[in-house]
Image: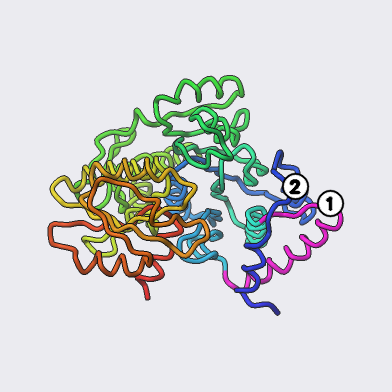
Amino acid sequence: MQSLHEALDWLYQQKKLKKREDLSRIKNCIELLKIQISYPVIHIAGTNGKGSTASYLNRMLMLSGKKVGLFVSPFVISFNERIEINQEYISDEDILLYIDKLQKLQADYQRNYEDTIPFFELTLLMALLYFQEQKIDILILECGIGGLLDATNAIEKKVCVITNIGYDHMAQLGNTLEEIAFHKLGITRPGVPCFTTVDEELLLYFKDYAKQHDVPLYWLTPEIKHIDIRDRGTKFMFRKDTFQTSLDGVYQAYNAALAIAVMQYLNPNLSVELLKEAIKTTSWPGRFEYITPQIILDGAHNLPGIQALSHSLHLKYPHKKIKIVFTALKDKAIDSMLEALDSVVDSYYFTTIEDKRSSTLDTFHTKKKYVLYEDYREAIKKARENLKTEEILVITGSLHFISQVRKFLRS
């Protein structure tokens, strides 16, 4: 029997042979595996905030007595985080069991169709097999990239959620916000409600698309008011009720409001008290996460995420000096990300990570004070040693980075 490491290593190595132009392969595989999706699905797309929104929904549904499946990407600590039921990750034993089935499927598929099933599609199939066997009541399904041609879009849904639209994955989705929005809106279906907090500049595009495709559209932004992040967590008003999250960041008000609106649509009789309790007790690692009162991890990994982080730091710590340990993957808009951070940052510790997509130290350009460390562990060690009482240290730039940092800090 193969080890978990060997099995996951095989899974990571599975690449597609040709560019995905439709969803026929994943649909075919669902049929071949005789997967039946008999439960309602909440489908979430967007540039940022998908994970937090999914976490709020997960907590709400659990507190209302549902057996909830959750599929997210990427993970922060371990692969198991991608697939969970009622906040329990899929076990190593189950991963091995399903990878064994998927290896057989892959061999048959290559032989019969002269094509390969890539990593993300195989992972989704693993989740669907697991959820079917465990007989879940409802599934929260997070898109990988985009929406229209994302493998998750092969699954029919009861509700759609689009968090926001920003510049990320442009090679796959396009170079304008409208092109990116077109891909995200691809998850919608005629007659299926779509809830969004997209920026107002794209609202007309969303309304036109929704009208042409018979999509009931709910834009929630005007209903979100009085956002306050001065204390720990985020306080805000939505539809005349005041909510308090345990998660920091202005954007958490929007993510939480999306979850509240979806729950009120699915179950109009759900008590506001239950929703408040769910919002208050939701956690999500790597998103404005306090390691100590002075050290924050944030998985912002693209320009919209960094802009949101910068805005939250400005509001929360107007009288503190902000130091940042930063690295990013080389395909990101690093110059723009640093430009957004420069408005709140006092100094940087630039570093690299153990990833073939990692940027190199000569990538980073800023007029702010900075030091360079090839080893991120050394960068964090020096940053912590030099941290003064009036300073806040933020570690950010990449979810892959945050994943490695959390493991390092735990050890």
Instruction: Please name which of the two marks, 2 or 1, marks the residue nearer to the observer.
Output: 1
Quarter containing the N terminus: bottom right
* Residue 368 place in picture, x, y as percent: 24, 48
Viewport quadrant of the C terminus:
bottom left
Residue at coordinates 21% horizontally, 60% vertically from top-left?
Answer: 294
Q: Residue at x 31, y 41 (%)?
A: 340
Q: Is residue 95 magenta?
A: yes
- Residue found 41% across the figure and 61% down from its top: 352
Q: Secondary structure at mark 2?
A: helix
Image: magenta residue range: 91-118
Residue that label 2 marks? 25
In this rendering, the answer to whether 123 lies above or below 219 is: below
Q: Amino acid at mark 2?
A: Arg
Dots 2, 1 in contact, CB < 8 A: yes
Magenta stretch contains residue 324:
no
Q: Is residue 240 visible?
A: yes
Residue placed most toward the observer, 253 or 337: 337
Report which quarter residue 387 is drawn in.
bottom left
Q: Which mark is residue 113?
A: 1
Q: Can see residue 268? A: no
Q: State the scheme by which the image is colored.
A: rainbow
